[in-house]
Structures are given as structure tokens and as C-alpha cells.
Image (spheres, helix red, strand yellow):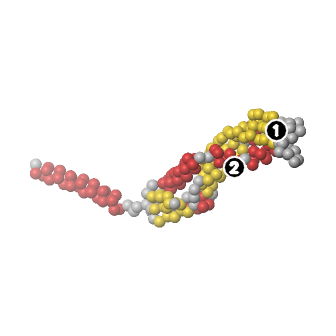
């Protein structure tokens, strides 16, 4: 019986030594995978990262009147033209990566992003409509007058349509996109945003 007990103890000791050796190998025997270098050039090649697209439909009023009668403060009667347009377009807001700064020190990546800004503003002329038109036969506006008027008001439209919240959302989405890109390279990398 003593012999049987000795065999069991020897077997248990061998199993424990095997598990201990395996644990030590896993802890010290494997070399840790080196941290990848964040490909700064890949991120900066994006140039403009449009992260919010704002579609809008707004109204503009076009007015044109003949000049005043000489030596009076009166307009020439019957020469006033009014047109109300429904203007449709979209504005893309994002970050200009040409002005970004990205540095990596070991497992720490520091990103300095510029503020979000309007990257593009496109008018969808086929969807623009004339809602109201009152023109004078003495003062007929031309199609080029309308196009020039709408084009000249693009900045005003953007100012009215875009809020601080849209710019803040664009900034946060840009940060999230960059963070996700870097974490896909290696989740051990810490990303911080400065500025």
C-alpha cells in the first residue's frame, strides 16, 4: 500500500511540476509583441476628414427695384420684382488633417487636432424651387441674377444653418475615428488629444 501511495504522490508531483513549468513559460518564456508604430503619414494623408453632413432646405427672398427717380426719394412705380426661393443644399463639416499634429512616444500617442470647420458647401440647384414670384415687365430679372443671388448668399445660409453643436459633434467624431484607427493597430496604445 505504501508503494501505491508513493506512486500517487509522484504522479501528482509530476502533474504539478508540469503545470508550474507551463505557467512559468507563459509568464516569462514568451516575448511580448512590440508596439506598432502609428502610421502618422496614413492619418495625415486623409487631408480633410468630413465627419458631419448637414442637409438643409431654407428660404431666400430676392428683391430688385429700379433706381429712384432723379432728385426725389421715390422709386419708379411698377418696377419692383420679388422672388422667394426654396434653396436646398448640404454642408460638410470636419477637420483639416493638414493642420493636425500626431506624435508617438512608446505606447502613448498625442494628437493635436485643429477645430472643425466647413469643408464644403454644395447647393443642389435641381432641387431649388421658386415658391413665389412677383415680377414687373419693366424690371424682369434674368436666371443669372437668381443664380448669382443664391451663390452670394451661401455664406449667410451656412451661418444660419450651422450651430456650435454641429461643430462640436464633428470634432468629437474626428477624435473617435482617429482613436478607433489607432486601437485597431494595437489596443495597448493610449491616445490623448491635446489643444
Residue 42 seen in the current view: no
Instruction: For mark 2, give the secondary structure.
Output: helix
Which structural element holds mark 1? strand
Residue shown at 65% from the left, 52% from the top? 119
Question: x, y percentage for residue 81?
Answer: 82, 38
At a point 46% along the width and 62% down the height, the residue shown is 108
Q: Which mark is residue 81?
A: 1
Mark-to-mark CA distance, 1 and 2: 24 Å
Of 52 and 140, nearer the camera is 140
Q: Residue at x 72, y 44 (%)?
A: 123
Q: Position of residue 61 (x, y in %)?
A: 74, 40
The image shows residue 29 at horizontal and vertical percentages of 35, 62
Image: 85 above or below 6? above
Q: Residues within 10 Å of mark 2 (few under 14, many from 20)?
A: few
Residue annotated with mark 2: 155
Residue 128: which disc? none
Left/right placement of residue 85 relative to residue 162 reads right
Q: Residue at x 30, y 56 (%)?
A: 23
Q: Is residue 103 above or below residue 1?
A: below
Which image quarter: residue 78?
top right
Amino acid at each position: 500500500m505504501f508503494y501505491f501511495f508513493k506512486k500517487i504522490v509522484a504522479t501528482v508531483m509530476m502533474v504539478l511540476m508540469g503545470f508550474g513549468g507551463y505557467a512559468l513559460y507563459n509568464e516569462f518564456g514568451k516575448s511580448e509583441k512590440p508596439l506598432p508604430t502609428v502610421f502618422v503619414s496614413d492619418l495625415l494623408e486623409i487631408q480633410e476628414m468630413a465627419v458631419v453632413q448637414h442637409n438643409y432646405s431654407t428660404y431666400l427672398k430676392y428683391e430688385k427695384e429700379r433706381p429712384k427717380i432723379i432728385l426725389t426719394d421715390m422709386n419708379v412705380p411698377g418696377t419692383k420684382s420679388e422672388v422667394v426661393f426654396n434653396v436646398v443644399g448640404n454642408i460638410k463639416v470636419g477637420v483639416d488633417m493638414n493642420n493636425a499634429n500626431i506624435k508617438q512616444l512608446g505606447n502613448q500617442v498625442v494628437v493635436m487636432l485643429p477645430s472643425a470647420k466647413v469643408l464644403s458647401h454644395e447647393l443642389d440647384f435641381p432641387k431649388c424651387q421658386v415658391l413665389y414670384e412677383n415680377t414687373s415687365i419693366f424690371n424682369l430679372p434674368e436666371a443669372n441674377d437668381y443664380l448669382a443671388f443664391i451663390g452670394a448668399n451661401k455664406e449667410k445660409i451656412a451661418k444660419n444653418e450651422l450651430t456650435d453643436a454641429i461643430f462640436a459633434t464633428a470634432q468629437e467624431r474626428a477624435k473617435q475615428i482617429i482613436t478607433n484607427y489607432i486601437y485597431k493597430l494595437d489596443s495597448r496604445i493610449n491616445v490623448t488629444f491635446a489643444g
